Amino acid sequence: MISEANTAEAMDRKVKTYLAHGCIEVWVVYPKTRCVWVFQEGHAEEFRRVLRCTLVDGLQIDLDGVFPSAQSRTS
């Protein structure tokens, strides 16, 4: 999960390290922009509505249910 303390360079290093050490898929969650980037070796994809996982056949995550709505963030 991205926080204000994370730099783009640090996250890039972490993703590359995880993949180099055998992770098949790395998810980077951006709560402020309500999206998830999914990284695999040689491939990255951004998801904003429904995250589809290739590792678990049929797994789909509705991101509107994961991230708080703009209204609930201001109340």
Image: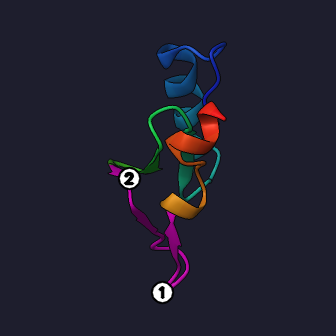
Outermost residue toward the bottom in this view: 58
Which amino acid type is shown beneath numbered disc 1? Gly
Looking at the image, which residue is at 61% across and 54% down? Answer: 23
Which quadrant of the figure contains the C terminus?
top right
Front tag of 1 and 2: 2
Work out whether residue 42 or residue 8 is closer to the camera in this orientation and state it: 8
Work out whether residue 6 or residue 72 is closer to the camera in this orientation and state it: 72
In the rendered view, would you say 41 is above or below 31?
below
Q: Which residue has dot 2 on it?
A: 48
Q: Which residue has dot 1 on it?
A: 58
x then y, percent, for residue 16: 52, 34
In the rendered view, would you say 74 is above or below 5?
below
Which of the marked residues, 1 or 2, is nearer the chain's N terminus? 2
Looking at the image, which residue is at 33% across and 48% down? Answer: 42
Which amino acid type is shown beneath numbered disc 2? Arg
x then y, percent, for residue 31: 56, 37
In the rendered view, would you say 71 is above or below 6?
below
Q: Is residue 51 magenta?
A: yes
x then y, percent, for residue 73: 62, 36
